[in-house]
Image (cartoon, helix red, strand yellow):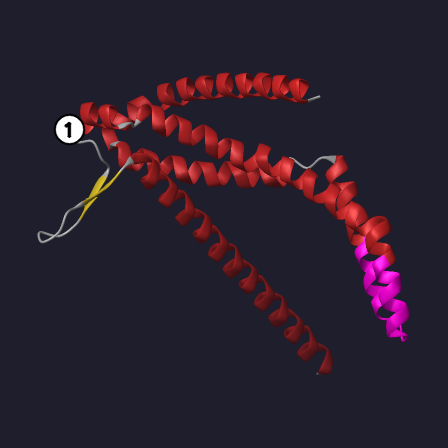
């Protein structure tokens, strides 16, 4: 069994690595004209933005029927457990909740979590890995030296201390995290405005009906 799993992982990695190499070649050919005009820093910021957009799109669109069914099963048994805990007899409710945990809820959660993890690997972590591989290949220090005359993207430091050199991968990851944080704040702001608009519309309707 162990040899079969190792062989499967080797084959899977070969396909993933071949996909990454193809992706690197395609992206490099597309971005080369832009890179000669804007420079590596802008390209890395653009890649981070496109990564966030693509992962959000894939996360929203790539939902399997199995994952949806497992989510429904998990929520159902979770609600059943919560109902059991609301039983007037606390001891009886606790026993019922434990039985539900052992018989169905734990298994439903495990299946739902595992399916979600696999979807996350396919829709988020794999795209990020592919872009990081591209950045590592196309913006390594030797390549940056050819393009810009220096082996780093940014240099941070004062005249009194040793400067901190920001490489391409670190610069990309910081940009990526910044865009994800910005996405969260933007989504919350849009949701807050939507709720305020709904409340205002309800208030207007209430005022109209009371006149």
- Work out whether residue 7 can be spotted: yes
Question: Position of 210 compared to 141: left or right?
Answer: right
Question: How crowded is the residue under tag 1: few (<14 C-alpha within 10 Å), some, or many (20+)?
Answer: few
The answer to which of 101 and 24 lies nearer the viewer is 101
Return the residue found at the far front: 2
Q: Where residue 160 sits in the image (x, y, percent)?
A: 9, 54
Q: How many marks?
A: 1
Q: Is residue 43 above or below residue 72?
A: above
Instruction: Assign the C terminus to one quadrant of the image.
Output: bottom right
Q: Where residue 94 sits in the image (x, y, percent)?
A: 85, 67
Question: Position of 152 compared to 4: left or right?
Answer: left
Most common SS among magenta residues: helix
Residue at image position (87%, 68%) is: 93
Q: Is residue 184 above or below residue 154?
A: below
Q: Where residue 187 sits in the image (x, y, percent)?
A: 52, 55
Residue at image position (67%, 79%) is: 207
Return the residue found at the far bottom: 211
Q: Assign a secondary structure to mark 1.
A: loop
Instruction: Assign the N terminus to one quadrant of the image.
Output: top right
Q: Where residue 35 sits in the image (x, y, percent)?
A: 28, 27
Question: Position of 26 compared to 153: left or right?
Answer: right
Residue at image position (68%, 40%) is: 114
- Which residue carries the number 1 mark? 149
The answer to which of 163 and 39 lies nearer the viewer is 163
> Does residue 93 show up magenta in the picture?
yes
- Work out whether residue 61 can be spotted: no
Return the residue found at the far left: 159
Q: Which residues are magenta?
A: 76-98
């Amino acid at each position: 069994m162990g040899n079969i799993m190792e062989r499967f992982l080797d084959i899977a990695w070969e396909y993933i690595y071949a996909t990454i190499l193809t992706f690197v070649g395609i992206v490099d050919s597309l971005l080369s004209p832009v890179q000669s005009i804007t420079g590596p820093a802008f390209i890395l910021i653009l890649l981070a933005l496109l990564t966030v957009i693509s992962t959000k799109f894939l996360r929203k669109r790539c939902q399997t029927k199995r994952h949806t069914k497992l989510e429904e099963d998990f929520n159902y048994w979770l609600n059943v457990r919560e109902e059991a805990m609301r039983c007037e007899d606390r001891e009886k409710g606790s026993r019922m909740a434990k039985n539900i945990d052992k018989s169905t809820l734990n298994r439903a959660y495990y299946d739902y979590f595992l399916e979600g993890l696999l979807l996350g690997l396919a829709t988020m972590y794999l795209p990020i890995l592919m872009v990081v591989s591209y950045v590592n290949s196309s913006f390594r220090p030797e390549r940056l030296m050819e393009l810009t005359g220096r082996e780093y993207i940014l240099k941070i430091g004062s005249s009194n201390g040793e400067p901190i050199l920001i490489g391409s991968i670190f610069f990309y990851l910081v940009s990526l995290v910044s865009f994800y944080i910005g996405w969260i704040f933007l989504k919350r702001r849009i949701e807050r405005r939507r709720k305020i608009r709904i409340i205002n519309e309800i208030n207007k309707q209430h005022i109209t009906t009371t006149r």
